[in-house]
Image (tube, rainbow, N blue to C red):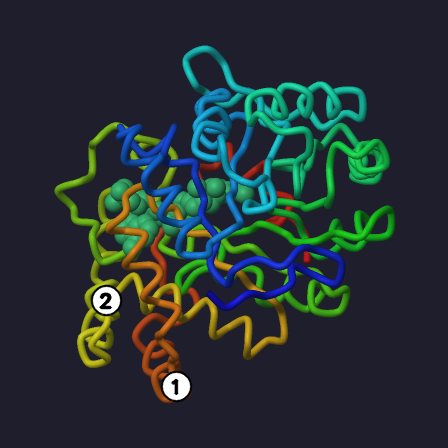
């Protein structure tokens, strides 16, 4: 497995990371045994970056990862945890809390659920509009001093917020959505990340399954997060977006690879072209999906391939926003350059 350093100060990670959210939450039912088997298969393939959030299944996801890692050397995994998102008993999102006083409390519960005494990368899931980012980062820096956390990350922030945070403590990576159909970071965040030596851990590389090549209109209405919160999965938007996928499928067929592999390889190619370390964090919940994603590591898109893809899926081709209006309102990344 090829590895890369996350930012100027971060750990060495495999060029592909595993996001564990869908194993506990938001993407419909998941099979617990298959989730654990997928985590083990990822570790055995050399993937070490495991991403979670304390609010994914209200602690379920951390306990699942803790179970998967039990009995293994702790250094095998680089655990990335998001905190601060508040959930109601029915699962709805209530807002964010990244006050300095709350950070240590969130961390204490995460350590217990994960069964570890440190977290590799700790990050606020969103900027808390009531708390200056400097205060939140300062609180994490204190937890680093105390030995409970190794690195600070961010999630869905603008370039300006990244600068402010980085001035308090070096930031390892910004986790943010990036794919052939979600390219907002190209003008705002990526140039700042390059300048500061901060990596990007990209989520939504398959646009939550929409551009994986496995989604179909028949899957709509399954009652998961995507039905209620993802305009791109709804009605006419879905039809328009799936038409884009068919254009990618033609190119994938010509290359003898799958649509998902093209989508992942495209993100990796952007990192190389733009001088930023970009690690796709893939939401595989099953071993077959993981294997398909691993295959993308061998797909090197040529300049001609990239131009064909650009023509097939131009920069702003997606129909619909990436989240619903309420959640878009919480994206610092969408507010300023
Ligand atoms: N920072 C943030 O705000 C934020 C937001 C969302 C997610 N994340 C993180 O990013 C991770 C990835 O989530 P995502 O939504 O971005 O996932 P994604 O990789 O864009 O999509 C995952 C979905 O695609 C399906 N899929 C189809 N083919 C696949 C393949 N070859 N490999 C992997 N999945 C395939 C998955 O499996 P099925 O077909 O089995 O459903 C799943 O439903 C999450 O687990 C979480 O850790 C972060």
Q: Earlier in the sequence, mark 1 or mark 2?
A: 2
Q: Callout 2: helix, strand or loop?
A: loop
Vertically, is 45 above or below 86?
below
Percent x, y for residue 277? 60, 67
Question: Dividing the picture into quarters, in which one does residue 6 lie?
Answer: bottom right
* Mark 1 and mark 2 residues within 8 Å of each other at the beta carbon: no
Indicate left or right for 199 with 243 as reference. Answer: right
In the rendering, at what x and y percent does residue 85 appear? Answer: 58, 27
Q: Residues within 10 Å of mark 2 (few under 14, many from 20)?
A: many
Q: Which residue reaches farthest top?
A: 89
Say if 49 sits above or below 297 in the image: above
Indicate if the residue with disc 2 has its beta carbon within 8 Å of ligand 1. Answer: yes
Q: How many marks?
A: 2
Task: Please give the label number shown on residue 39.
Answer: none
Residue 259, quarter of the rendered image: bottom left
Q: Which residue is mark 2?
A: 258
Residue at 59 percent across and 66 percent down: it is 4
Determine the image quadrant of residue 266.
Answer: bottom left
Residue nearer the viewer, 152 or 167: 152
User: Quick check: can you spot residue 69?
Assistant: yes
Seen at 69% across and 61% down, the residue is: 7
Q: What percent of the width, then of the height, locates residue 295?
A: 32, 66
The image's mark for residue 302 is 1
């Amino acid at each position: 497995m090829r590895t890369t350093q996350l930012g100027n100060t971060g750990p060495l990670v495999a060029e592909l990371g595993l996001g564990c959210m869908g194993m506990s939450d938001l993407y419909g039912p998941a099979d617990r045994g298959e989730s654990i088997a997928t985590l083990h298969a990822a570790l055995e393939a050399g993937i070490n970056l495991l991403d979670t959030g304390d609010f994914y299944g209200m602690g379920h996801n951390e306990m699942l990862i803790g179970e998967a890692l039990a009995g293994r050397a702790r250094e095998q995994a680089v655990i990335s945890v998001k905190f601060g998102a508040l959930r109601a008993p029915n699962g709805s999102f209530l807002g964010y809390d990244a006050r300095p006083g709350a950070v240590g409390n969130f961390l204490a519960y995460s350590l217990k659920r994960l069964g570890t005494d440190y977290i590799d990368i700790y990050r606020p899931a969103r900027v808390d509009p009531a708390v200056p980012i400097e205060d939140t980062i300062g609180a994490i820096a204190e937890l680093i001093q105390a030995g409970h956390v190794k690195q600070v990350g961010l999630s869905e922030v603008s370039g300006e917020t990244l600068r402010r945070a980085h001035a308090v403590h070096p930031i390892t990576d910004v986790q943010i959505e990036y794919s052939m159909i979600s390219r907002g970071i190209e003008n705002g965040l990526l140039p700042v990340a390059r300048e500061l030596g901060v990596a990007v851990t990209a989520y939504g590389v398959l646009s939550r399954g929409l551009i994986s090549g496995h989604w179909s209109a028949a899957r709509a209405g399954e009652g998961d997060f995507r039905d209620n919160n993802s305009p791109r999965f709804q009605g006419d938007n879905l039809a328009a977006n799936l038409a884009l996928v068919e254009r990618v499928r033609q190119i994938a067929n010509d290359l003898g690879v799958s649509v998902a592999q093209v989508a992942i390889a495209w993100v990796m190619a952007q990192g190389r072209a733009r001088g930023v370390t970009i690690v796709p964090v893939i939401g595989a919940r099953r071993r077959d999906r993981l294997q398909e994603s691993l295959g993308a590591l061998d797909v090197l898109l040529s300049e001609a391939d990239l131009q064909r893809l650009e023509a097939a899926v131009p920069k702003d081709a997606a129909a619909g926003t990436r989240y619903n209006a309420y959640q878009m309102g919480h994206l610092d990344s969408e507010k300023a350059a």
